[in-house]
Amino acid sequence: MKKLSILLLFVFIGLSINAQTADELKKTLASKKDSIAKLQSKAKALQGKIDALPGWRKGAFGTIGASLSGFNNWYSRTAPDASAGNIGVTINGYANLIQNDFFWRNSAAINLGWVKLDDKTPGVTGDEDFETATDVFTISSLYGKRLNKKWAISGLAEYRTTLIDNFNDPGFLDLGVGATWTPTNNLVVVIHPGNYNFVFSNSGSIFESSLGAKIVADYTKKYGGLSVKSNLSMFQSYKDGDFSNWTFTNSFGYTIWKGIGLGFELGLRKNKQEALNNALISNPAETFNTVDNKLQSYWLFGLSYSL
């Protein structure tokens, strides 16, 4: 009985020591977490000061999406013997020089996509090659001489066209001057009442250059592992509303591991000149007054990367 009591005593002491040790470890862990949080806060504050210093800011991110499939004697399909594919790539890059008395902001965006459906059924003519589905190229350069911290007198050059099919047909070049508002380091709003929209095309009178106003709003920011870029570019023609256009793109990339993650991009556009040019392919009698200027859109979801 005495030996049993001594054994129980040792067990109780051991449990007490283990419990005490666990409590001490938890307290130490909580203290370390507090220290880490304070260090992260200090590091974030230092990074903010570094970002505010004059100099170049450069970066790029994008999305890659792909889907490939093949079917052989799959009779539930209309085309039981076929191969299909969808490939898309987006690239968003910028190089901004920020100084105390001026800024020079440069950006480029590319979105390319290809699709393929090759029907191998005997007697059916299929397309074995990939066809272009999305083809967007935009480059811009904005220079501003600061009046104060938030306002600047500025000049903008922006060019938009396609790369794979019909390069520069049409091509849109905006050259304008006015003012730029920068309420934060991440938001840039361009207001140019004096802007000339040059349009290059082989389609005769459908595409016409004109004088107008240019409005651009660009937002670029990182929230931890999430990269966000939104850009709205509008041109309002003083000559005719049919020559006005706007494009709105939104890109998101979330980094999971070493710059690789998930990405999504959505683009919207309205351009009556492009709508009429497309409608004339099937209806030569179409005019600006009769064409249905539908909302253009594209989207891409896939793997993202950041540099």
Image: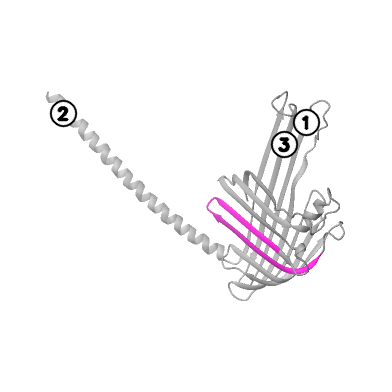
Asked if the residue at tag 1 contacts the one at tag 3, i.e. Cβ–Cβ closer than 8 Å, the answer is no
Name, please, the residue furthest toward the left.
2
The residue type indicated by label 1 comes to Asp
Q: Nearer the viewer, residue 184 or 7?
A: 184
What is the magenta segment's predominant secondary structure? strand
Instruction: Give the secondary structure at mark 3.
Output: strand
Residue 213 belongs to magenta span: yes
Residue receiving disc 3: 85
254 or 135, nearer to the observer: 135
Q: Are marks 2 and 3 in contact (CB under 8 Å)?
A: no
Q: Which residue: 65% across, 59% down?
A: 231
Q: Position of residue 237 (x, y in %)?
A: 75, 67
Please rate how many residues cluster around mark 3, counting C-alpha atoms within 10 Å: few if below 14, some from 14 to 19, many from 20.
some
Amino acid marked by disc 3: Gly
**Residue 6 - label:** 2
Placement of 68 over or under 258, stated as above or below: above
Q: Which residues are magenta?
A: 209-234
Which tag, 2 or 1, sits closer to the chain's start? 2
Inter-mark Cα distance, 2 to 1: 85 Å
Say which of 10 and 233 sits in front: 233
Marks 3 and 1, the one that precedes in the sequence: 3
Q: Which mark is residue 119?
A: 1
C-alpha distance separating marks 2 and 3: 76 Å
**Disc on the earlier residue, 2 or 3:** 2
Residue 212 position in % (x across, y down)? 74, 69
The mark lying in front, picked from 2 and 1, is: 1
- Name the residue type under label 2: Ile
Q: Residue at x 49, y 58 (%)?
A: 44
Q: Nearer the viewer, residue 27 or 150?
A: 150
Q: In the rendered image, which quarter is residue 184 located in?
A: bottom right
**Viewport quadrant of the N terminus:** top left
The picture places residue 120, in percent across and down from the top left corner, at: 79, 28
